[in-house]
Image (cartoon, rainbow, N blue to C red):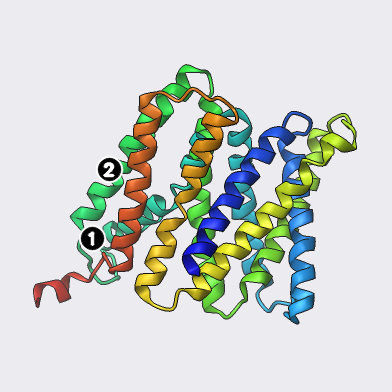
Amino acid sequence: MQVLWMVVGAFLFATMGVCIKYAAVYFNTAEIVFYRGLIGMLVVWALSATQGTGLRTRYPWMHAWRSVVGVSALGCWFYAITQMPLASAMTLNYMSSIWIAVFLLAGALWTLLPGSRRPRQTLNLPLLLTILVGFVGVILMLQPSFAQDQRWAALLGLFSGILSAMAYMQVVALSRLGEPESRTVFFFGVGCTLAGGIAMGIGGLSAWPGWQAALWLLPVGIFAAGGQLCMTRAYAHAKTARGTLVVANLQYSGIVFAGLYSVFLFQDELGWESWLGMALIVGSGIVATVLRSRSVLTPASSQRGS
């Protein structure tokens, strides 16, 4: 069941991207973020009420910081979706696993600096090579975008992956404190609503296109909330380390769905560089996830004794 839940969640996120593209014809990015947060927040609130899960938290500042980082990532990602082929924007955002590996390596390098008080760690060469291969994929993917004058959208899409990795680490910290996922998702929706509303007040509103066009905003919020809940259910059903690893890697099926949407729905022309870049990023992300699950960074002292 965990496999099914993860694939369904990935499909919902890819389909959300389709709705964002259609909604972007009538609304700006701030408005889409606002309605995504508002609708998602209401959906999670209703589900929490039926399940008896309280939304009061003892860690408001941690939720606030998670929302700041997460909403920033979301805004960058949504803008990239509106300006780039859907498959390319999805792939750049799904680089979070590679960026987490970069953070781990940076932490290990920090222990090697003179005067560092942390236990010295050795770098895992397979992880380093995996990261390098992932960045080769990024270079291949960004070439067509820079040639088509989509450089800012591409850079923001890349930045969304970095911020998503930071948000993921904050979510892990909250879960270790016992915060239920529904509460974290709810406060993220609150953050999206507040940030989107402030950005709308600064940047202005789009001309009202009519209710028929505005209906594209509804599935953005519903599919986003549904995707998050499905992925949460997938991890909850993964009782073993191997099951969790399978579930984590199946999130990349969302790139497959986005690629199908790009080709058959939007008729995006993706060159061989883009397809190869996507393959390298997905492969690197999967390998990075596997290596991180095996405690790729081990104190040097314990390695000497082995």
Q: Which mark is residue 112?
A: 1
**Which residue is located at x 76 percent, y 62 percent?**
43
- Residue toward you, 50 or 167: 50
| Placement of 2 over or under 144, stated as above or below | below
> Can you give x and y, in whole percent of width and height, for residue 33 in the image?
72, 45
Q: How many marks?
A: 2
Q: Secondary structure at mark 1?
A: loop
- Residue 107, by quadrant, is bottom left
- Residue toward you, 140 or 166: 140
> Can you give x and y, in whole percent of width and height, for residue 94 in the image?
47, 48
Q: Farthest residue toward the left?
A: 305
- Residue 288, by quadrant, is bottom left
The three-letter amino acid code for the residue at tag 1 is: Leu
**Horizontal side, residue 238 vs residue 60: left or right:** left
Q: Which mark is residue 132?
A: 2
Marks 2, 1: nearer the viewer: 2
**Horizontal side, residue 77 vs residue 251: left or right:** right
**Which residue is located at x 32 percent, y 63 percent?**
292
Dot 2 or dot 1, earlier in sequence: 1
Q: Is residue 124 visible?
A: yes
| Placement of 93 over or under 291, stated as above or below | above
- Residue toward you, 102 or 48: 48
- Residue toward you, 121 or 232: 232
For mark 1, does the 10 Å Cα neighbourhood hold few (<14), some (14 to 19), or many (20 or more) residues? some
**Which residue is located at x 49 percent, y 68 percent?**
2
> Can you give x and y, in whole percent of width and height, for residue 156 in the image?
54, 36
**Which residue is located at x 35 percent, y 59 percent?**
289
The three-letter amino acid code for the residue at tag 2 is: Leu
Q: Secondary structure at mark 2?
A: helix
**Horizontal side, residue 93 vs residue 201: left or right:** left
> Can you give x and y, in whole percent of width and height, for residue 40 in the image?
74, 57
